[in-house]
Image (cartoon, grey):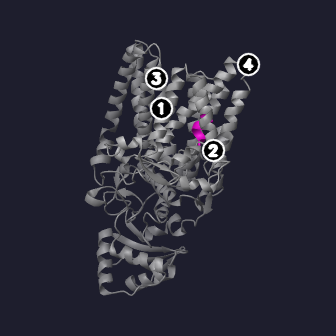
Amino acid sequence: MLLVLAAALVTRGFWPDPATRALGLNQNDQALDEWFLAYATRAYRGDFGFVTGALNAPDGVNILGNASLIGLGLLFAPLTLAFGAPVTFAVATGLNLAANGAGWYLLFSRTAGLHRLAAFVGGAFCGFAPGMVSQSNGHLHMTAAWLVPPMVWCVVKLARGGPAWRPAIRRGALLGALAAAQYFLGEEVLFLTAIALGLFCLAFAATARPAPRAVLPSLGAGLGVAAAVALALLAYPLWVQFRGPQSAAGGVFGPDFYSADLKSFAAVSPLSLAGGDGAARLASGPAEYTTFFGAPVLIVVLGAAVWMWRRPAVVAATVVSVVLLALSLGPHIVVGRHRTAQWGPYALLDGLPVFEWALPARFALAAIPLLAFVLAQVVHAALTQTETLKLLVPVAVVASLVPLAPMPLPTVPRAPVPAFFTEGYWRGYAPRDGTIVPVPLPDSQDPQAMRWAAATGVAFATPQGWFIGPYGRDGRAAVGIYPRPTAQLLHRAAVNDTAPALSDNDRVALRRDIAYWHASAFVLADGQKGAEALKSTLDALLGPGERVAGVWVWRARV
């Protein structure tokens, strides 16, 4: 209940009407997430695919090549159908945090056998660490990590399983199924979890005495079964993602840009109780405060590791945390926004398959459960093993965490979706799955018009948009698509707030673009920047527009 209340506090800015509120620090990713959540509802009517022409019409988008929220979308589809994607986004943002905390609490208390207070401290840190709260700014695929504790449970049970084969096979199959499910919740989380778990197992095996050789048969068999099950379930989706239509090679975002600043480890996130705006300059954006642990927490963790140096699990967790945090620094060390000539450990991985898609700063997210485990272990040790430290140690741990307590996510008002879409007027201007062209067209700088399609359950297609596709050099990954001539014309009209002089070439380009998009209508909403200039431009190109339910509409004529 406390975790749910904390999640409600973090997301209170969305309520009482999420449709009219938006993330103040990342509206664009929210618009994309809401589109994906709405698109997933099409599966309930048997009209869903991993590649769709509903965005970036007519070329389409490879859903699996984007942070597509398929798992969350399918899970919350009834909520989306009943109340809309903005409500689902707000609910999922909070529940992800609470569910993460609850899952780790259960793992620490029941599987690790820790005192309930110690387990709660660890679970709360896992759910509401600064990195997780910052990722809640539009990155639901990163905060949907509540299947990670069950996956860790499977690995622990395999390590404790003994010589019996049947339990190992069952737990391995469960682990493979969970891994497949996590792929659809958030593939990047699965990638980071696999790395962290693998490193932890190696570190534990290296520090435990005697060496845990007896676990190898059960653990090896279980992991083999898990790999086979996951591969069987994910073979086709992985082919679509990496080799299917609209797939793209390489990553979009450079590792040097999305790497951690060395000074950020001791800083406090601007989204935390003791945070200030000045620390924001140490991260690439408000969704990437992944390494803002604060000096007190790092000191407490280091002290706990020294005190409990005879416990292999604590030592392994500490060592792997250091490795992950070192990797988060990226290919070159950055100190106070100054990129030095000193290479970072990530330089050894940069450019390798799969790693070319990774963002170094997010490796710090995988360290959060490991740091939480150390904190929970030291609280447990103090509560159960020593009278003199029973009060002092828990107070010190909690005191180090209080400055990191999450604050509500900043939100701002946003215009509601026009009644033209919410009340179904659009059906008189385009067939189902036809193409409606928002004016101006959505792109990575302003994708808000994608909300129009989301409000209809993505019942019509939208040209352009905010997505990742094969439009970079030599077919490599890029954000969005190069706009067509009519899209450029409308963009200029909006930016300059002046209707441009039109030529015969503009009219020819319009006819070609209408044919290319298979467009049925152009729609301009009230309040759009440069609205008068846009209306004048389209009136000149397509004739006088129709005023319908809060928008201007022009039927597309080739």
Measure how far apart labels 3 and 1 are at the Cα level: 10 Å
Mark 4, secondary structure of its residue: loop
Identify the residue position indicated by label 3 in the image: 204
**Disc 3 + disc 4, Cβ < 8 Å:** no
Residue neighbourhood size for the residue with mark 3, other residues' Cα within 10 Å, grouped as few (<14), some (14–19), many (≥20): many
Residue 145 in view, yes or no: yes
The x and y percentages for residue 294 are: 61, 43
Measure how far apart labels 2 and 4 are at the Cα level: 34 Å
In primary-sequence order, the first of circles 2 and 3 is 2
Q: Amino acid at mark 1?
A: Val
Q: Horizontally, is 379 left or right of 148 in the view?
A: right
The x and y percentages for residue 343 are: 40, 45
In primary-sequence order, the first of circles 4 and 1 is 1
Q: Amino acid at mark 3?
A: Phe
Mark 2, secondary structure of its residue: helix
Mark 3, secondary structure of its residue: helix
Q: Horizontally, is 251 left or right of 80 in the view?
A: left
Task: State yes or no: residue 238 in magenta.
Answer: no
Measure how far apart labels 2 and 3 are at the Cα level: 34 Å
Identify the residue position indicated by label 1 in the image: 320
The x and y percentages for residue 279 are: 59, 53
Identify the residue position indicated by label 2 in the image: 7
Q: Which residues are magenta?
A: 123-129
Residue neighbourhood size for the residue with mark 1, other residues' Cα within 10 Å, grouped as few (<14), some (14–19), many (≥20): many
Towards the viewer: 558 or 32? 32
Extreme-front residue of the structure: 341
> Residue 387 has which mark?
4
- Tell how many labels: 4
Is 534 rendered above or below residue 414?
Answer: below
The image quadrant of residue 132 is: top right
